[in-house]
Structure formats: C-alpha cells, structure tokens
Image (spheres, rainbow, N blue to C red):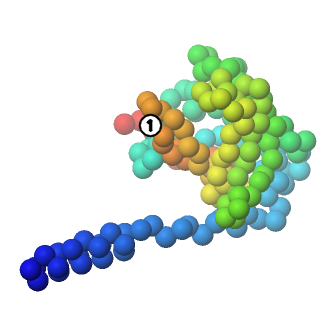
Amino acid sequence: MKKHVFFYFFIVLVATSCKEEPKTPYLLPENAETLLTADSIKTWKIARRYNGEARMNMGDCFLGYRQCFRESGLVRDNNSSLKNCGPSLEASWKITTSENGHSYLRLAGDKIPELLSQEEDYKFFKILHLSNDSLTLSFKHKQFNEKRIITDYLVREDLEVEDRDFHW
C-alpha cells in the first residue's frame, strides 16, 4: 500500500513540476518603429527559419526573399519578382501589445487569406527581438492539419550571413 501511495505522490509531483512557466515578454525598444523602418524604408531578408526546433532548408525563394517596411505603415515583399515563388504580399503593418505584454507585428491586407491559407485578412507575428540589424518573429502556421510555430530570423538586407544557404 505504501508503494502505491508513494508512486501516486511521485506522479502528482512530476506532473505539477513540469508546467511551463509563462515567458517574460520581450521588452520592445522605445524606437521600435524606427528600427523597423530606418526613418523611411528598411529592407529585411531571412537569415534562418525554424519550423519548431528544426532548421528549414533555404532554397532560392527564401534566399531571394525581401520584405520592405515603410514608415508610412506599408509593407511589401518581392515574391512575385522571383521565379516560381508566388505572389507578393502588400499589407499595412502596426505594432501591438497583447494583454500579457507580448509585442506583435500585425499585418493586414487583402492578400493575406490567400497567401497564408487562412480566413482572416490579418496575421500577428510575435516580436522576439528587434535591433538595428536583426528582427526575430514567430508565428503560428497550419501545416498538414497541424499547427506549428515558425520562427524567422531576419537581418538587414546588406548584411552577410554565414551558412545562410543551409540544406540538409
């Protein structure tokens, strides 16, 4: 009997101690909008992309992909100018904060439902880091009927990134 009590106590202890602590929200710099747009327009490229914990291959579309954020609140990418990479995104952007203090980049536009295979015409990207040289965003993406977290590490267009053309 004592063994069963100990076993159940152990299971309860393990189950309650494994709960994830809420993550402290990333504190956005005061000049976040300027860091994103460089006072007028700033172009970002993908340095690395992760699907969960797995680093994704960087093929031609990813390597050529650029996003331009304008101070006016517009964002546009260059997908349509790349061979076989699909249509371009044109949307408005703004930085928002959730009730629990996390900062998000909210993109809204007519093409978002088509491009991201969703009903809403907006998408929230959680801001994990923002500096003059780098921007890290994560977002939920439905893939093969399963929700996944994609994390993009972006850098200024003019920066060199070692091992950027990663392939398995």
Residue at 74% of width from left, 45% of height from top? 106
How many numbered dots are placed on residues in this image? 1
* Left or right for 148, reference 31: left
Is 1 or 90 nearer to us in this picture?
1
Q: Position of residue 33 (x, y in %)?
A: 82, 54
Q: Position of residue 70 (x, y in %)?
A: 85, 41
Is 161 or 135 nearer to us in this picture?
135
Residue 9 sits above or below residue 22 on the image? below
Q: Position of residue 13 (x, y in %)?
A: 30, 76
Residue 168 sits above or below residue 95 on the image? above
> Quarter of the image containing the N terminus?
bottom left
Q: Position of residue 3 (x, y in %)?
A: 10, 79
* Left or right for 35, reference 149: right
Is 77 or 120 nearer to us in this picture?
120
Residue at the bottom extreme, as displayed = 2
Residue at 55% of width from left, 67% of height from top? 23
Residue matched to label 1: 146
Say which amino acid is labelled 1: Glu
Q: Residues within 10 Å of mark 1 (few under 14, many from 20)?
A: few
Q: For numbered disc 1, what is the local secondary structure?
A: strand
Residue at 17% of width from left, 79% of height from top? 5
